[in-house]
Image: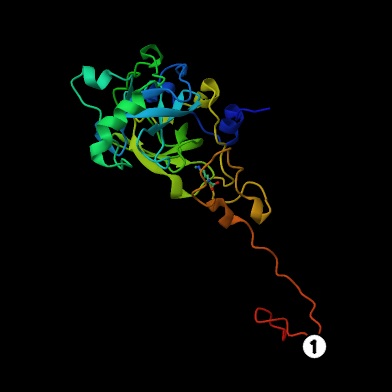
Amino acid sequence: TYQPFDWDEYLKETNSVAAPASCFKQAVTPPHNEFKVSMKLEALDPRNVTSTCIATVITVLGSRLRLRLDGSDNKNDFWRLVDSKEINPVGHCEKSGGMLQPPLGFRMNASSWPMFLTKTLNGALMAPANIFQKEPPSPKCNLFQVGQKLEAVDKKNPQLICCATVGAVKNEQIHVTFDGWRGAFDYWCRYDSRDIFPVGWCAKSGHPMQPPGQKNSTGHARYKFKPALTAPIPPISSTVAESPEADTSAPPPPPITIQVRKSCMGGPLIDATQ
Ligand code: MLZ
């Protein structure tokens, strides 16, 4: 059975506070997700945001969708909230005078785009307009404070929403740092980013939340682990891109003593003279 992360306990344990919901450009209640796998919709190409493409829903998770642009490969999937301004029902682009574009890296000859588009839409399951949700209003300014806790998308593993802390605030930006992980995953984003959420968002929306890694704020392991087992267990289908840097704080293994018979040379890696 899935145990949601106990934020109350963690906030006490770390003597910290959650960033208030009013800091975020997120709906008060996470929006319902009525999308189904294989539905088609229009999405801005994340690699070329001036073009609108056809996308297919690959995964439905909490209030989010994993999307793949039709005609693109499966290595450039991206995630959007169901109340993202960057997704719309099929037909929206044309109605507003635009033309659907092939995605950046279209895997066919550009000349085959019109026929590809016809075929990809023919008989497809179109996401109905009523399941798209209106983008929530944005706070007027950056209300975040250093030290506040939040839930944030790990941009290197964008299927993950993780336990995070505001590490710094500068003008319209905040520095998102991930609890229990070294800096490799940290990033700056605007206060109105759609990738940051108030504490409790995942639990409310039915999205898994990654608990902190194994380092506390002093950089030391909170618990002792066998060196090979320090990685948090990755979720199913996690694209493992980074080695967990928490490993580096684990104590080195003790020196190994090998009893070697005098007549045995032991091979090039063993100094039999010691
Ligand atoms: N695949 C990675 C996940 C790291 C997630 C860190 N998030 C802040 C690993 O286990 O190394």
103 shown above or below 22: below
User: Where residue 265 sits: x, y (%)?
Assistant: 73, 85
Image coordinates for residue 147, horizontal then vertical, percent:
45, 36
The colour mode here is rainbow
Above or below 225: residue 148: above
Would residue 143 be visible to someone looking at this image? no
Q: Residue at x 47, y 16 (%)?
A: 32
Residue 91 appears in the picture as rendered: yes
Drawn side of residue 85 relative to residue 198, left or right: left
Number of labels in the image equals: 1
* Residue furthest left as drawn: 97
Outermost residue toward the top in this view = 130
Q: Which residue is mark 1?
A: 263
Quarter residue 104 falls in: top left
In the depicted structure, whether residue 26 falls above or below residue 214: above
Tag 1, which secondary structure?
Answer: loop
Callout 1 environment at 10 Å: few (<14), some (14 to 19), or many (20+)? Answer: few
Give residue 254's position: percent from left, percent from top. 70, 66
Is 134 displayed left or right of 202 in the figure? left
**Toward the viewer: 81 or 179?**
81
Q: Who's the residue at 65% across and 28% down the image?
A: 2
Residue at 36 percent of width and 33 percent of height: 70
Q: Amino acid at mark 1?
A: Ser
x and y percentages locating residue 167 in the rendered image: 42, 41
